[in-house]
Structures are given as structure tokens and as C-alpha cells.
Image: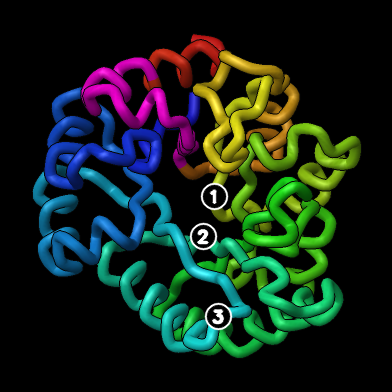
Amino acid sequence: MRPFSFNQATAKYWPLVDAVKGCAAAGVRYVGLWREPVREYGLDRSSALVRDAGLTVTSLCRGGFFGADDWFDDNRRALDECAALGAPALVLVCGGLSGRPLAEARSRVAAGLEALVPHALEVGVTLAVEPMHPMFAADRSVVASLAGALELCAPYPAAVVGITLDTYHVWWDEQVLPLIEANGDRIACFQLADWVVPLPADVLVGRGLPGTGHVDFAPLVEAVLATGYDRPIEVEVFDEALWNRPGADVLRDTIAAYESVMGT
């Protein structure tokens, strides 16, 4: 079984120090981090905290939002933060329309990747484009399919531009399994989350722990592992009910959910 990585967004209100210590105490050796709590605690302090606890960072979220005025400088900073933390991948949420036509917004993503590739090469971090469910196309990401994400990656080596594959966003796509099989080298980060219904009014937080919803995890996990994917697998869940629980309890239940869908 691939090692488990706890993405700190699953316990959003758990302070970074407590999350890192909690993971170490539970025997979890990998974490996915977010820029805001890292910035609040301090980049150097965060790096030392993770290192001293014996943990490894599997990804940093997030970069992208190529429609923002400061997108270039912000993404360069994010790449530098990844390098400082030892995170191999910067998760890119590519941004919505930002008042532009859809085709133009997607062109900005392609141009943004091209502009960032030299710095990604310099610091040794993969730009990991995350295809998101189409319901987020207007406000969060115009990259709304795995095929679309892979098309953006195609001009570049896989070590420089890859994808973040989140089951929550791609489980419904009838092309997902053959696309995974044909493009396994592009998977820089693999994340698990379930699709629960009914969706809440804020659909962003309409996710569940693996095994609590409607995603058929086995074929997706098998397809990814069959490509030779050898990094830890993250669980990243946005759910208000989880966020309002003690972090240690969330971690315990997340580990159990991961083990359940992974067949242990």
C-alpha cells in the first residue's frame, strides 16, 4: 500500500504546529501543506518544524489563479516556498474567468505555465495543474477536465509540468481511466476525497472522507498505481463538519478511511 499523506486542509482549523506533532505521534510521515498557515507560522520555522518532526511534505497548495494581477510574482514565491519546504509539487488551482471569455481565460493559463517553467526548472519543483470539476469553471478553475489539463502539460517535460489528480474532481469522467493509463508520468500528486450528496449551498465544502460518498475508488487507485506512481497518496477533504472537530480526531478518522479504501 502506498504511504498515506495527511493534507492539512482536511483539518483546516488545526494549527500547523499541532497538525505536524499530531501526524508524528500517529506515525504519519507525510503531509500536504497550504501556503496560508505556512506563511502565518513563518516559512523557515515551518520547514524546521516539519524536518524536526521527521515528516516530508508531499505538496504545497496553492499556486495558479492566473487571472490575478500579481499572478507571476505570487507563483514564483510559491515555487520558492516549495523548494524551502522540500515539497516536490506546487498544486495549481488555475483560476476562473476573472471577467474574461472562457477561451481567453484558458489561454492565460497556458501563457502562465510557459512563463513559470524556467523558475520551476531552476528550483526543481513540478507545476502540478489540478483539473477541477466543471462546476468550478467560472470562479475557481477553467481547467475543467483531465484531458484539458494534460493538453496544457504536453509541451513540457513531465518533471516540470504535471497534474494533481484529485478523485473528487475526476471520478465522473468516462475517459479518466484510459487517460491515467496513458499519462501516468504526469501525475505529480494523487489526492483522495469522496463525492457526497446532497451538495451543500457552498459546493466547495461538499466533500467527504473516502468511502463516505459515491466515488468508486478501487479502479482509480489501481489505475494510478499501475502506472508506477510511487509517491504517497494524500487525503484532502473540505468539509465544515470535519473542520469543526478536534484535529486529532479528524486525523484518526482520515487514516481509517484511507486504509479502508486502500484495502487494508
- Report which residue position mark 1 lands on: 189
In front of the other: 205 or 93 = 205
What colour scheme governs how the chains and residues are painted in the rendered image of this protein? rainbow
Q: Nearer the viewer, mark 1 or mark 2?
A: 2
Whether label 1 touches label 2, CB < 8 Å: yes
In front of the other: 53 or 211 = 211
Residue at horizontal 71 percent and vertical 82 percent from the top: 108
Q: Is residue 105 magenta?
A: no
Q: Nearer the viewer, mark 2 or mark 3?
A: 3
Residue at horizontal 15 percent and vertical 66 percent from the top: 42
| Residue extent of the magenta highlight | 232-253
Residue 213 coordinates in the image, percent (x, y): 63, 17
Q: Which residue type does callout 2 highlight?
A: Val
Q: Residues within 10 Å of mark 3 (few under 14, many from 20)?
A: few
Residue at horizontal 68 percent and vertical 66 percent from the top: 96
> From mark 1 to mark 3, how far is it between C-alphas?
24 Å
- Report which residue position mark 3 lands on: 68
Q: Is residue 247 magenta?
A: yes
- Report which residue position mark 2 lands on: 91
Residue 237 coordinates in the image, percent (x, y): 48, 34
Where, by quadrant of the figure, is residue 167 drawn?
A: top right
Residue at the extreme front of the image, as rendered? 201
Q: Which residue type does callout 3 highlight?
A: Ala
Q: Residues within 10 Å of mark 2 (few under 14, many from 20)?
A: many
